[in-house]
Amino acid sequence: MSAANDQPIGYFGSYGGRFVPETLMAPIAELARAYDKLSGKRKFRKRLQSLLRDYAGRPTPLYFAERLSRELGGARIYLKREDLLHTGAHKINNAIGQALLAQSMGKERVIAETGAGQHGVATATAAALLDLSCTVYMGEEDMRRQRLNVERMRLLGAEVVGVDAGSRTLKDAINEALRDWVTNVRTTHYVLGSVLGPDPYPRMVRDFHRVIGDEARRQLRRQAGRWWPDLAIACVGGGSNSIGLFTAFLDNERVRMIGVEAGGSGEELGEHAARFRGGSVGVLHGTRTLVLQDTNGQIAGTHSVSAGLDYPAVGPEHVVLAEEGRVEYTSATDAEAIDAFHRLAATEGILPALESAHAIAEAINRAPGLTAKEIVLINLSGRGDKDVESVLAYDRETGDRGSGAGRQTVPRVGREFE
Amino acid sequence: MSEIGPVFERCREEKRAAFIPYLTGGDPDLETSGRLLEALAAGGADLIEIGVPFSDPIADGPVNQRAAARALAAGTSLSAVLDLVARYRDKLGVPMVLFTYFNPILAAGVERFAERAEASGVDGVLCVDLPPEEAASELIPALRARDIDSVFLLAPTSDRRRIQAVARASTGFVYYVSRTGVTGAREELPKPLLKEAKRMRRRLSQPLAVGFGISTPEQVRSVARVADGVVVGSALVRIVEEHASEPGLAERLEAQVRELADALR
């Protein structure tokens, strides 16, 4: 793994760490101890596995996207169908894991932040399942564009608190969740939804998601005759679904990997969430990593059509993977993601989450340059029901379809879908 | 050493706790902010905490969040706050402690920041999201080399091991956070505060200042029984917020500071 043994605890190279107010220092040390202890226990692992299988729907299928592959005329494209999980995205892997941890630590309440709403829904679901009370913080801009998920969380019994500070998106929701946690840390566990935040979160969230790549590896062996893809692609907001896919293949030099960030609507600071292009080393939300910021160290606003990628920092392990040259990080624009959304809908009958559509967009660019012997594995991290309104609004504003469109006619999705 | 130690010594000789008001630097704008520092000194501040506004202040309640937003909107940066200190530190003769988040310092470069802080006359630096463990490699040595105090926090959740770590790393004083939570005035002091502060103080050789949620003269007096210094922040920031555009803002603030500081005399 990337974290060398001589690193201080919680670091990946020089990234990671525990940059939190003193009030949280003893509790996160306790959390790390509890996680290390619990994750080694057979009983816990069996409980988690059985919930993931019988409740959440693991293993998720690996699907050979034959039509899309044929249309692109290059590599064979396989989709890891995390969108078919209960609640509609990979986030449930981590939410159930952390909710079990919270329960074993005797916490009666969980809190979470959410951007696209998928992590919020997953946490609300796990909380209902395990009888924990649940509060989810969500930026008001995100509540507007992911309204369906707000209602889902409320129906699941969670309190959804809108955050109207800053850009009113994921970053501001995390600020508010951290303030809640600082206040209620004795009774409350913070179910952080990505490989971000102070140690142990980046490694703990990674561990709960590595099942994605582990499964895909076995499935590729059965379905494609070998253990590895030539190219693995996933979108990167905080970076949880990508690290979940990549971890299984890091040791295999034959596997190229690409993480796709939100290229947003332009190149200027504030118009995108491409940390590897425009970021510099900073500390945000408890971790030292790449951050989009101005020269005074104030965190920049971000933009993406996809709420789940709309965040100014990236998980610290990704920064090391980039520095080592192990993973390449690139970005897809709003327009490319919207195009990819339509393309997958039209060719495969799958509406991807706009987050995952960024990964599809990268595959659309890369696949034609590869041969039919080569395998591209894409993590389809979530389903797109929540994004129907956003896609329709985007199409309306840009006059039909995003740039580069028009490869085929696309059936419109009716509004009754919501 | 900085001037912070002598201030606590003088207060001890006077058999009282030090009064430490907090304001966000550059709130509502840099020029007014300077006049407000004068008001703090005139009202009886023994030490002044100046907040460096940050876009994502996770340890602050709504009042200080809004202050940071106002200051940033008025163009305040870490560099501008250091200029403010340079202009007022010696003129007022009151030691100044920067209350900041780590990222602006990291963006400036830790060494470059320390140089500028020294040149500006900063007496101490308190980084609210930088525990001693993360400060050990860069910030502490950079400050120590320039006789600037590095102040760390303790909280009700701090266990014995953490108290030791903070005791080892802190110079000038230790800041005890009165409650689990963010900054902001509260009606009542937390019940275990006095006992907890005593427990912390016994394990420290440095002076102990207590802050977070203290706003009235009664609260100041009662905290002073177990502390060497009392910090009042949001209650003063609120005055700035509510009267920002009025001509009598500085006088009003000074009167409030005097009332709070007098509670210790």
Image (spheres, coloured by chain):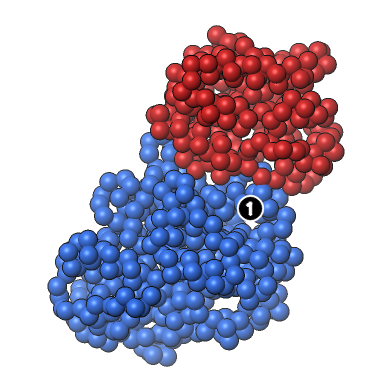
Q: Colour of chain B?
A: red
The answer to which image quadrant residue A103 occupies is bottom right
Q: Is residue B37 left or right of residue A104?
A: left
Tell me what residue is drawn at x 29 percent, y 84 percent.
A348
For the C terminus of chain A, give its image quadrant.
bottom left
Q: Is residue A358 left or right of residue A59?
A: left
Q: Is residue B27 above or below residue A29?
A: above
Q: Colour of chain A?
A: blue
Q: Is residue B242 visible?
A: yes
Percent coordinates x, y for residue A166 in the rendering: 44, 45
The answer to which image quadrant residue A135 occupies is bottom right
- In the rendered image, which residue does mark 1 sit on? A181
**Could you say whether the residue bearing mark 1 is in a helix, strand or loop?**
helix
Q: Is residue A235 above or below residue A281?
A: below
Percent coordinates x, y for residue A360 in the rendering: 30, 72
Percent coordinates x, y for residue A124 in the rendering: 57, 69
